[in-house]
Amino acid sequence: MSKSVTDNISFLILLESSQRSQRRALLSTISDNQLKALSELALNILHGTLPITSHSKKTLQRNKNFVRLLSAKSQAKKFGIHINGLYVELLEDENDNMKITLRDIPIQVNDEVINAYIAQFAKVTGNIYHGYVKNTSGERTRIKDGVRFIHVTEIMRPIPNNPTIAGFMGRLSYRGQPCGICNEVGHPDYRCDKRRKPVCFNCQQPGHFAKTCTLEPVCHKCKGQGHRGNDCPAPLNASKTIMTEDEQKNTKASDKSIKSSDSPQIDTIITGCSIAKGIYTSMKREGVSEKTKSGAGIEDIDILMKRDKIDNQCLEKIIIQAGTKNLVYDNERVESCLVKYESCVKSLHLQHPQASIVISSITPVHPYDKKIQGKIDTMNKQLNMMCRREDFLVFVNNDAMLLSNQGKTSKSDFKENDVKGVHLSPHGYNKVANHINSVATPRNKRKTRGSDGSTPGTIENEPKKALYSNIVEENE
């Protein structure tokens, strides 16, 4: 390769690495003949007709921008290059790994739970890294600040901006993330043109804030002038109108119900696997229905509940007995099962907002297996934590019923000749059913509690002063 050709290649590299304004200045320094030579050089390299000596091969390898100068990446991959008659295929050297930043999820949430959630959208390529608090001198301490960094690849679908993981809502961001308002890429939420512009709280007009507003106040509820939202009479009148309409609808509904057949109203639904079927057999009464299927997993609950139409006005309880198939038969990880459970109860609550969702603990296996029971215990603890965070969830722990033999299973509670040892005997089903009935009281029948525990607080107890005063009066 001649010195002039090498100089031209160097000039092309310099031209490509410069900014647009600098390129114009560089092009103005060369003549028309030099510009023509540069064009011919680019075409020769593109078609593989440029002779390259062995002395210049290392120079070609060092110039990483060389291919980018000639054509687009797809075109370069298609044609490749020829070096001394040898065809060299160009491969894509691009790393599609992406770092996800997750905030606001407590440290107590296991990293494996987060991995299981992210795995629904992308392939997790490594461990989760944590951010740490820095002291006043800028040095990193050992205290985690709650920020997590997850490396992923092969994103199958957009990951939610505000994911709910283990019952906690977090904030998630990554490069190329779609806007949460318009679902388009290229800009964050706060720069979206479709984002609602902030308005003044006083006059409901954009362009300024309430502290600098000099206009007359406008109600943000009825849009009327002369009063604020706290003093608005519209909600009271509207509620009366709505109540009147509701009363009319209820009257019509009651008339229809009188004319309709005397079919029992379903207040409790038991759903899940064959164990749920056995519990239903022990709890069977008027008003209790079952939506079960042998071998059903956690992911099948939503489908089972949609099998027939349900009257939400009468429904008080949904009892779920599921997870044995996932943990024992399919040997799924606890984290994966927990994600499925969270998705399940969230969907059920949206469909039946008035009903309490009772989660019956995953029953042990017989004979007692320490390894399997450890996995079941971990899952039940996670389910208990999940239920504590939501008012509509109730957790029923059946371990006291089924691990009554010095912390191990009893033969009388389980079905004989069961290979996996997961199905209960009629005696075992009765114990679990009675325990669920004693714990899972419907929300509208529960005693209002002022304290956190199950024992009523001092204020809730009936006063004993009157009783004592009567005794004193009788003695006197």
Image: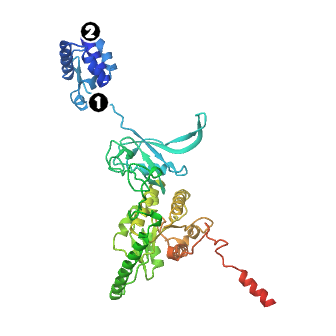
Q: CA distance from mark 2 to mark 1?
A: 29 Å
Residue at mark 2 = 3
* Quarter residue 320 falls in: bottom left
Q: Quadrant of the N terminus?
A: top left
Q: Which residue is mark 1?
A: 91
Q: Quadrant of the C terminus?
A: bottom right
Q: Is residue 348 above or below residue 472?
A: above
Q: Position of residue 113 (x, y in %)?
A: 48, 52
Q: Amino acid at mark 2?
A: Lys
Q: Residue at x 55, y 67 (%)?
A: 397
For image coordinates 46% across by 46% down, the residue present is 102
The image shows residue 104, relative to residue 434, as above or below, that is: above
Query: Which residue does the image show at 41% across and 56% down from the upper left?
Result: 203
- Give the mark nearest the N terminus, 2 or 1: 2
The location of residue 445, given as percent across then percent down, is 52, 77
Q: Considering depth in this image, is 445 or 450 the residue closer to the camera?
A: 450
Viewer-side residue, 316 vs 295: 316
